[in-house]
Amino acid sequence: GLNVRGGISVLALSLSSVTRHVINVSAMGLSSTSGRLDYLLTAGEHHLNVPRVNLNGAPLRASPNGTLPLLLPVQRNGTVIELPPLSFGFFVFPEAGVRPCFTEKAKQQAEREAAQRRDAETQTEERRLASATERARGSTRKWSKAGGGRGKKAGKVGGKGFNQERESRRP
């Protein structure tokens, strides 16, 4: 369906006979590359006294038996909508990701995906910390082997312990 991923629809109406309106749709989850479906209805021959209407520039006509035609959208990208004079339209952003507009199934899927991302981030952080800890241990071992820290030679000066050295200086 169209509303699986939190889709939204925008209705815009222009009653002006001369002004072309530019509308910038702003919603969390939308970007300049967001896909949208345009259903733009304009007055036939650009005035309202004609019994014809165009859908996305093509005349909209019922079949001879009175059946309505398929209302096919034009696919576009972006959040900027241009609305010509004497027109109205429905502009559908099916992948807007607006959480209140998710279907129940999509909400559950989004929650699972968020949990998986959190788990992956936690595992990455744990690996990073383990690696840093291992590097620190390796540095400590190297330092101890070189005679620093609390290795075998710690507390000795010139091969003698500090206490021995102090004792040898006494009269």
Image (cartoon, helix red, strand yellow):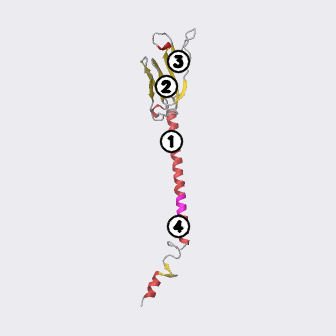
* Comparing labels 2 and 4, the label whose residue is closer to the camera: 2
Amino acid at the residue labelled 4: Thr
Q: Nearer the viewer, mark 3 or mark 1?
A: 3
Count of labels in the image: 4
Residue occupying the point 52% across, 63% down: 136
Question: Could you say which is closer to the camera, residue 93 or residue 31?
Answer: 31
Determine whether the residue tagged by mark 3 lies in a helix, strand or loop: strand
Neighbour tally class for label 1: few under 14, some 14-19, many 20 plus, Cα within 10 Å? few
Q: Nearer the viewer, mark 4 or mark 1?
A: 4
Mark with earlier residue (4, 1):
1
Pointer 3: what residue?
A: 55
Q: Position of residue 100 (x, y in %)?
A: 45, 32
Q: Position of residue 91 (x, y in %)?
A: 49, 25
Q: Which mark is residue 140?
A: 4
Amino acid type, label 2:
Phe
Q: Answer above or below: position of 123 versus 149.
A: above
Label placed on residue 114: 1
* Neighbours of disc 3 within 10 Å: few (<14), some (14-19), many (20+): many
How far apart marks 4 and 3 lie (CA) works out to: 75 Å
Q: Which residue is mark 2?
A: 91
Specify the segment rendered in magenta: 131-136
Residue type of the residue flagged with mark 3? Leu
Tell me which secondary structure the magenta stretch mostly adopts.
Answer: helix
Counting residues from the start of the chain, the first of labels 2 and 1 encountered is: 2
